[in-house]
């Protein structure tokens, strides 16, 4: 499988230093240190609260804007007080460093500095022997790294660069290490779109910074699953409504395995969008007892997609789950003779956690990646006649609309097919599966939007309109 490739590259520079009192560090401005004493104290909390209510204060610039909102508020004052007491607090002061991660060493959280980090000189010694840890961490999650040192260090300096440029801010913390292994814990933030790149570590002894040691790491959104062969154990845990991040079948006989927690009664659809010519994606699903409950593949000389779900015919039919527990999803090339990249998507259609859509209302959104499914809920009453329209806004995006009644029964299913933006609808006047009959039940209906072939992304607008009945 390929390593993660989120939309923004992040180079994470974590530098080990041997002195806390170096001039370049002592002069650094610490997030929350209103009086500039070099630490965050109760006095700083008082100064921040004074600034928040417009009273004279020692706060200057963004040093007291703990949450990076652009203003100093009472929330910032509370965060300073929490930080002074050693409690968890928002401490980024608008820095990219603080937005992306917090760093802890031996249980102590590093302070965030607002200046550019120090840079090791040319020819600096390589004191960091190795860095081991996970290749990825979910946004909001935690990752632990073991840093093997060749000699003792006194302090740690943490810095980051993004897209080859050093980001604003760094952190520093006494290491208290006599050499050997040091445990570094990263608490990932929630950077929009995730981030990935190099995690670098260096040392400084007797006031001199050492050379960097690199480790690849990715911070991915919570609904993303990063594929990293040999680094992340399989089967990889997979959330409902989640997507894999740039996975691939690296050799023809490779099989990638994922696991999701299913509950009896769940209506699940699993899709794989292939992106490589001649790669014939195959999906196998096994229940908690190891029984194969669905198996399907696509076959084409161009990129193709495949899915399993309750609406498909056997063997591609994945029946409504009857057993609760861990389900295993295997992805491979059907003929074991081609390689290719793909995205996996697992959607729970019932019970649904849909986005509310008001009667006579509309919402604009997009399907991305290609196998994505967006679900909306609207309240219907027996006797209502309703029209649901999806207007596609992207070439080759073949909008599909599925409607389920309050019991999960599919009452309408339609799609459009064109190389230019196309629209699709369901209502009482149409025939076949495109007909949405007069509603016979009162309750929450679900409208699900996707690409009909699960092979294109695109923007769209969905609307629900009352034509006749109690909804008027």
Image (cartoon, rainbow, N blue to C red):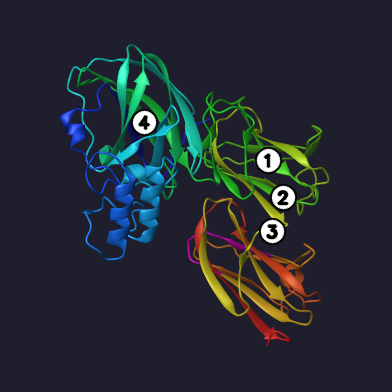
Q: Element at badge 2?
A: strand
Would residue 163 be found to the left or right of residue 250 on screen?
left
Which badge, 4 or 2, is on the more N-terminal residue? 4
Q: CA distance from mark 1 to mark 2?
A: 11 Å
Would residue 180 be found to the left or right of residue 440 on screen?
left
Q: Residues within 10 Å of mark 4 (few under 14, many from 20)?
A: many
Q: Nearer the viewer, residue 385 or 97?
A: 97
Q: CA distance from mark 1 to mark 3?
A: 16 Å
Q: Position of residue 19 (x, y in %)?
A: 24, 23
Q: Position of residue 305 (x, y in %)?
A: 61, 46
Q: Which residue is mark 2?
A: 268
Q: Element at badge 4?
A: strand
The numbered disc on residue 198 is 4
Placement of 433 over or under 328, stated as above or below: below
Q: Which residue is mark 3?
A: 352
- In the image, is residue 327 part of the stretch drawn in magenta? no
Which badge, 4 or 3, is on the more N-terminal residue? 4
Q: CA distance from mark 1 to mark 4?
A: 29 Å
Pick the quarter of the image with the C terminus: bottom right
Which badge, 1 or 2, is on the more N-terminal residue? 1
Magenta stretch: give its range.
391-402
Which badge, 3 or 2, is on the more N-terminal residue? 2
Q: Nearer the viewer, residue 66 or 346?
A: 66
Q: Residues within 10 Å of mark 1 (few under 14, many from 20)?
A: some
Q: Which residue is mark 1?
A: 260
């Amino acid at each position: 499988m390929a390593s993660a490739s989120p939309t923004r590259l992040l180079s994470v520079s974590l530098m080990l230093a041997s002195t806390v009192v170096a001039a370049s560090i002592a002069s650094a401005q610490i997030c929350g240190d209103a009086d500039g004493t070099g630490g965050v104290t109760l006095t700083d909390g008082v100064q921040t609260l004074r600034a928040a209510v417009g009273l004279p204060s020692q706060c200057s610039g963004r040093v007291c804007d703990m949450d990076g909102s652009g203003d100093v508020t009472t929330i910032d004052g509370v965060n300073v007080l929490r930080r002074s007491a050693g409690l968890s607090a928002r401490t980024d002061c608008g820095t990219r460093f603080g937005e992306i991660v917090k760093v802890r060493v031996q249980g102590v959280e590093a302070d965030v500095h607002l200046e550019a980090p120090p840079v090791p000189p040319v020819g600096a010694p390589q004191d960091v022997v190795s860095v081991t840890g996970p290749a990825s961490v979910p946004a909001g999650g935690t990752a632990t790294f073991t840093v093997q040192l060749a000699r003792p260090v006194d302090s740690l300096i943490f810095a980051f660069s993004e897209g080859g440029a050093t980001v604003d801010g760094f952190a520093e913390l006494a290491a208290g290490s006599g050499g050997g292994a040091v445990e570094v814990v990263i608490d990932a933030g929630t950077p929009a779109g995730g981030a990935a790149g190099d995690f670098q570590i260096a040392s400084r002894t007797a006031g001199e910074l050492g050379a960097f040691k690199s480790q690849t790491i990715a911070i991915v959104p919570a609904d993303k699953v990063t594929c990293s062969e040999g680094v992340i154990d399989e089967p990889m845990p997979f959330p409902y409504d989640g997507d894999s991040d740039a996975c691939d079948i690296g050799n023809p006989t490779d099989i990638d395995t994922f696991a999701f927690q299913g509950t009896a009664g769940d209506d699940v659809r699993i899709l794989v969008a292939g992106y490589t010519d001649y790669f014939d994606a195959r999906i196998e699903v096994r229940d908690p007892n190891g029984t194969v409950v669905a198996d399907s593949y696509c076959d084409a000389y161009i990129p193709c997609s495949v899915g399993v779900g309750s609406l498909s015919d056997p063997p591609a039919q994945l029946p409504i789950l009857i057993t609760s527990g861990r389900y295993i999803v295997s992805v491979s090339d059907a003929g074991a003779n081609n390689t290719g990249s793909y995205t996996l998507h697992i959607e729970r259609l019932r019970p649904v956690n849909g986005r509310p859509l008001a009667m006579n209302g509309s919402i604009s959104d997009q399907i991305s990646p290609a196998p994505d499914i967006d679900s909306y809920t609207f309240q219907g009453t027996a006797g209502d006649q309703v029209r649901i329209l999806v207007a596609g806004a992207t070439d080759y995006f073949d909008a599909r609309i599925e409607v389920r009644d309050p019991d999960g029964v599919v009452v309408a299913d339609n799609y459009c097919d064109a190389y230019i933006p196309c629209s699709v609808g369901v209502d009482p006047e149409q025939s076949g599966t495109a007909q949405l009959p007069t509603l016979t039940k009162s309750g929450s209906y679900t409208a699900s939007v996707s690409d009909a072939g699960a092979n294109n992304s695109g923007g769209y607008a969905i609307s629900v309109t009352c034509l006749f009945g109690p909804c008027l």
